Image (spheres, rainbow, N blue to C red):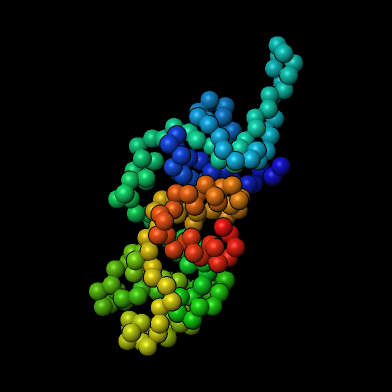
Amino acid sequence: MYGLEQPVLRTDVSGMPLEWINFQDAVRFYHLDQVAYTCGIVLYRVHGGINARSGLRSVIEVNSIIATPSGLYARLRNSASYIPPLSNAALFRRDFNLCLYCGQSFSTHDLSRDHITPIVQGGTNDWNNIVTACKRCNHHKGGRTPEQAGMQLLAIPFTPNHAEYVFLQGRRILADQMEFLRAHFPRSSPLHERLDSLGLS
């Protein structure tokens, strides 16, 4: 059994990943009989009150992955045109906390976002034009492109789909949750190779 701090992966009834939820939200879905089916392991058992008639105490077993009905917002997130919001936390996780110029790993505190084509040169503020850079490399590059600065970009940036974005939002991802998420990554997703290189296949 895991502690109650372990997040649950919520999907829609078709199996598309939606979001991470805490144990209170998961129990609420179970209590309202809105869990269509479950996958993965049982994370924890949550005990409720005692039934006055039977004298038995209620228990809800919460699985690591639960499928629930989804609303319009969830359907929009799974559409081909959906673009996840860009944040430093998700960006650094996409690039595995590596500076994509010097290739070294850094703590979040020592990282920054770099526009490949700088804004002052007409660059855009989107996933495909932004990479993780250590502060030293970012300062050295300044308002230049990598070519102008004589710096090599080590990986091509990409816009994650929603399943990839759910992975980027995860903190303590269990093996069964990871396997489920990876099944929804595009075959061409750079995350496959990056996860394999870290032994997270």
Residue 129 visible somewhere in the drawing: yes
Q: Quadrant of residue 1?
A: top right
What is the total number of numbered labels drawn onto the structure image?
0
Q: In this rendered view, identify the residue nearer to me: 196 or 115.
A: 196
Q: Is residue 2 above or below residue 148?
A: above
Residue occupying the far front of the picture? 187
Q: In this rendered view, identify the residue nearer to me: 88 or 42.
A: 42
Residue in view at x 68 percent, y 24 percent: 58
Q: Where is residue 183 in the image (x, y as percent from the top left)?
A: 48, 49
Split into 4 quadrants, where in the image is the C terminus?
Answer: bottom right
Residue in view at x 64 percent, y 46 percent: 5
Q: Is residue 126 toward the left or the right of residue 22 in the image?
A: left
Residue occupying the far right of the picture? 55
Q: In this view, does 140 lie above or below 21?
A: below
Residue occupying the far left of the picture? 122
Residue 22 visible somewhere in the drawing: no
Residue in view at x 40 percent, y 74 percent: 114
Q: Is residue 37 toward the left or the right of residue 159 in the image?
A: right
Q: Position of residue 139 (x, y in %)?
A: 43, 83
Residue in view at x 34 percent, y 69 percent: 129
Q: Position of residue 153 (x, y in %)?
A: 40, 78
Q: In this rendered view, identify the residue nearer to me: 141 or 158.
A: 158
